[in-house]
Amino acid sequence: MPHVPCFMFYDEMAKLILGITGEIASGKGTIAKHTAAEYGANTRRFSTILRDLLDRVYVQQTRENIANISTALRKTFGEDLLAKAMYHDTQNDQHEIVVVDGVRRLADITFLLELPHFKLIYVEADMQIRYERIIKRGENTDDLSKTFEEFKRDHELETELQIKDLKNYANYIINNDGVYADLYKQVDEIIKENMQ
């Protein structure tokens, strides 16, 4: 029988938990890196669990493979499987600020929403800008050779379909069409507001 998270102990140490969501290459990872560098935050990613599993079974870390393993796990063990893992990981984390990078569906944050210090940030950016970013960073094995048409098709993967809806649940919406300084300023204001 799966262990259901208990919400009784979250006040032992109040911490700011920032959930970061947005479409592919919108700047989620950049926000996480900035928050870690400037505020000593710890970063947790839903995709880390999936990437670890793919590595363990010697399967390439393509966006499609990550989407497939995510779908298979949730179909087999329940939609909230990764949400439970992330809830426990953030609760056990001793950092004052924890960034949860890569929220893709409401089910991902089912349990985190119960916490008083959880804030969801939606990052948006123009599709052409995001495409140029994904080619430059080459995070997945298939990114460097990806065409713009393939990039658009990536948005139709099951793991990407619910992201836009999360904008309706966000505490903050950040625009990342500009330079790093513009993005960092928006993030800094959110942290300042919530750490007073």
Image (cartoon, rainbow, N blue to C red):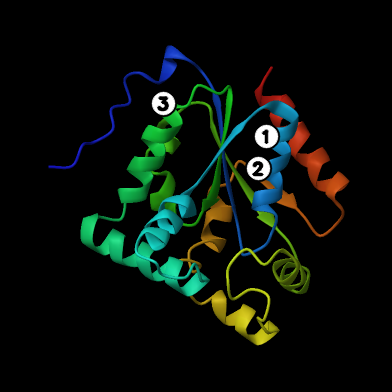
Query: How many neighbours does mark 2 have within 10 angstroms: few (below 14), some (14-19), or many (20 or more)?
Result: many
Indicate the secondary structure of the residue bearing disc 1: helix
User: Whole-percent x and y of residue 79?
Assistant: 30, 55
Query: How many neighbours does mark 1 have within 10 angstroms: few (below 14), some (14-19), or many (20 or more)?
Result: some
Residue at mark 3:
92
Q: Amino acid at mark 1?
A: Ala
Between the residue at mark 1 and the residue at mark 2, the CA separation in whole angstroms equals 6 Å
**The N terminus appears in which quarter of the rendering?**
top left
CB atoms at circles 1 and 2 under 8 Å apart?
A: yes
Picture disc at residue 32? 2
Q: Is residue 15 above or below residue 136?
A: above
With 23 as the anchor, is 63 left or right in this view?
A: left
Q: Is residue 85 visible?
A: yes
Q: Amino acid at mark 3?
A: Asn
Between the residue at mark 3 and the residue at mark 1, the CA separation in whole angstroms equals 17 Å
**The C terminus appears in which quarter of the rendering?**
top right
User: Whole-percent x and y of residue 57?
Assistant: 34, 64
The residue shown at (48%, 63%) is 162
Q: Amino acid at mark 2?
A: Ala
Indicate the secondary structure of the residue bearing disc 2: helix
Picture disc at residue 120? none
The residue shown at (65%, 81%) is 146
Residue at mark 1:
36
